[in-house]
Amino acid sequence: MSIAWYDIVGTVGVALIVGTYLLLQLDRISNDSLVFSLLNGSGALLVIISLIYDFNLSAFLVEFFWLVISLIGIWRWVRRKRNHSKQKTIPPLSPPRGR
């Protein structure tokens, strides 16, 4: 049995997804963190790359939606950070100081 480079890429992808899920269950990572979505998305992308060379429709569909959902998580994180930073840049209104 020989292992092709795309098998290794896919295996790394699976390790990222499973490892991320383990970190979530051990409370070492938050499900709304950027790292969570990046690890899941990266894992899904690596599995998809391996599927280009050894295609399986059901596996492709799972990983495609896993990637799309991870991209939604990344987009939501960016939007949250952008809104948070806008709130920080607006100085609070304070009454004028007396003389």
Image: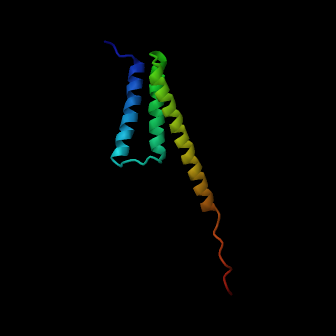
Identity of the residue drawn at 47% across and 29% down: 63
Please indicate whether residue 98 sits to the left or right of residue 48 in the image: right
Residue 91, placed above or below residue 84? below
Identity of the residue drawn at 67% across and 78% down: 95
Q: Nearer the viewer, residue 44 or 5?
A: 44
Residue 36, placed above or below residue 14? below
Identity of the residue drawn at 35% across and 16% down: 3
Quadrant of the rendered image containing residue 93: bottom right
Furthest residue toward front: 58
Identity of the residue drawn at 68% across and 80% down: 96
Q: Position of residue 18 (x, y in %)?
A: 37, 35
Please indicate whether residue 48 sits to the left or right of residue 91 in the image: left
Q: Position of residue 23 (x, y in %)?
A: 36, 43
Residue 87, placed above or below residue 57? below
Q: Position of residue 81 (x, y in %)?
A: 56, 52
Figure colour scheme: rainbow
Q: Quadrant of the C terminus?
A: bottom right
Labels in figure, total: 0
Please indicate whether residue 24 sits to the left or right of residue 37 in the image: left
Furthest residue toward left: 1
Residue 49, placed above or below residue 39? above
Furthest residue toward bottom: 99
Q: Position of residue 15 (x, y in %)?
A: 37, 32
Q: Quadrant of the N terminus?
A: top left
Quadrant of the rendered image containing residue 91: bottom right
